[in-house]
Amino acid sequence: MKLIDRYVVRELGVPFGIGISVAVMLLIGTLLFNNASEFISRGIPLLLVIKLVLYRAPQFSVIAMPMAMGFAASLAINRLARDSEITPMRMAGIPFRRIVFPLALVGAVTSLGSYLLAEKVAPWANEKGNQIVRQIWMQSVVPVLQPNVVFRTEGYTFYVGWLNKASKDLFHLREVLVYDTRRPGYPVWYVAPEATTTRRFWTLRRVVRRDIGKDGLSTVETYLPELTIDLKKDMDFIGGMATPEEMTGDQLMAQIRMLKETGAQNLARSYAVQYHSRFALPLACLILAVLSAPLSLRFSRGGTFVGILVSIIVGFLYWNIMLLTKILGENGVLPPLVAAWSMNALFGVVAAILVWRTG
């Protein structure tokens, strides 16, 4: 690596570190903000929330790396131009594309690192994170017991007329009414004069089951000496099939083939977009690094603030248009390959033109 390469690369370290840290913290903040009320109201342990954040960090890093690379390249060129260091380089016969070369090299290495993170680490971490999400929801299905209050949990609505806390986890109940709404149509009613619960398991005694017809009247009434409801058991089906974020590229491709063979074309198309995005998003590190350089140079007279603004605008446009093309791809408006790669192609062409015209 020549002196000019080392000189330019040295300018990237701190801005890249700041950029990826800020982006990841914003994504973590969004995760916590969107779920804070659920965490607090359900009494989710802090350690469980911290584990969820840590397991989401690899995926957040993959998302943040292209923006951080564009931010770093923009600030590096802005700093060199602001201190009048690029002008002597060009007067010495060094074309602008040669100055951009080390940025592109670092962008390519970052793209490779982002791909390896997305392919080797993020699927495992996302699987662990989703297990925690399921664990949180399993805790959430256990309701807070109160007399004379209707409360709902996953698939059930409860009313308890009287309760007595026998021990830490055991409650004696009277005048119990349960609506089972897991099936389509009218709910099934369970009425019991007494019951016990450990929060998760509800054991109703001397139960009358009423199946309600379309006219709102009981069609069948059945007497049951005892009925046990396991609230968490009804949540066990969640996550039975791995999400695309939990799969490697090979697993995604195998899943796509299986979905096509079974006729699930819409789901196969959605998975195909995710598969191509697995490769397209990391390459954005290289593209945004090259694109940000000539744009930052053009507006370098505005100072550091303008350099930051340029990187934010570029990242905003890339990310939001990419989300739009992915939605179009998942809905069949665009082929999955085009949906995933169109932004890289567009921004790559613009970057090449700007570098060529600047140099």
Image (tube, grey):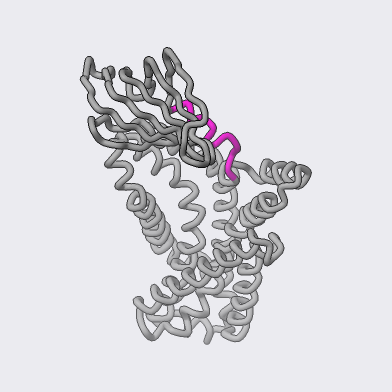
Look at the image and tell me in which quarter the C terminus lies.
Answer: bottom right
Q: Residue at x 26, y 36 (%)?
A: 149
State whether residue 219 is above or below residue 253.
above
Q: In this view, does 257 lie above or below 317?
A: above
The number of discs equals 0
In the displayed structure image, the side of residue 322 where residue 313 appears, left or right: left
Seen at 38% across and 37% down, the residue is 51
The residue shown at (66%, 46%) is 249
Q: Nearer the viewer, residue 11 or 333?
A: 333
Magenta-span inclusion, residue 237: yes
Quarter occupied by residue 24: bottom left
The image quadrant where one finds the N terminus is bottom right
The reply, left or right, for residue 64 in relation to residue 102 is left
Highlighted range, magenta: 232-243
In this view, the residue in front, 181 or 350, is 181
Specify whether residue 357 is in view: yes
**Residue 46 in picture, x, y percent from top left:** 29, 37
Looking at the image, can residue 1 be seen? no
Find residue 284 and report its horizontal and vertical position in percent: 57, 63
Rendering coords of residue 19 (x, y %): 40, 61
Residue at 70 percent across and 42 percent down: it is: 255
Identify the image quadrant of residue 329.
bottom right
| Viewer-side residue, 139 vs 81 | 139
Viewer-side residue, 121 vs 30? 30
Q: Position of residue 117 (x, y in %)?
A: 55, 47
Determine the main secondary structure of the stretch shown in magenta. loop
On whether residue 292 falls in the magenta region, the answer is: no
> Which residue is the extreme one toward the right?
261
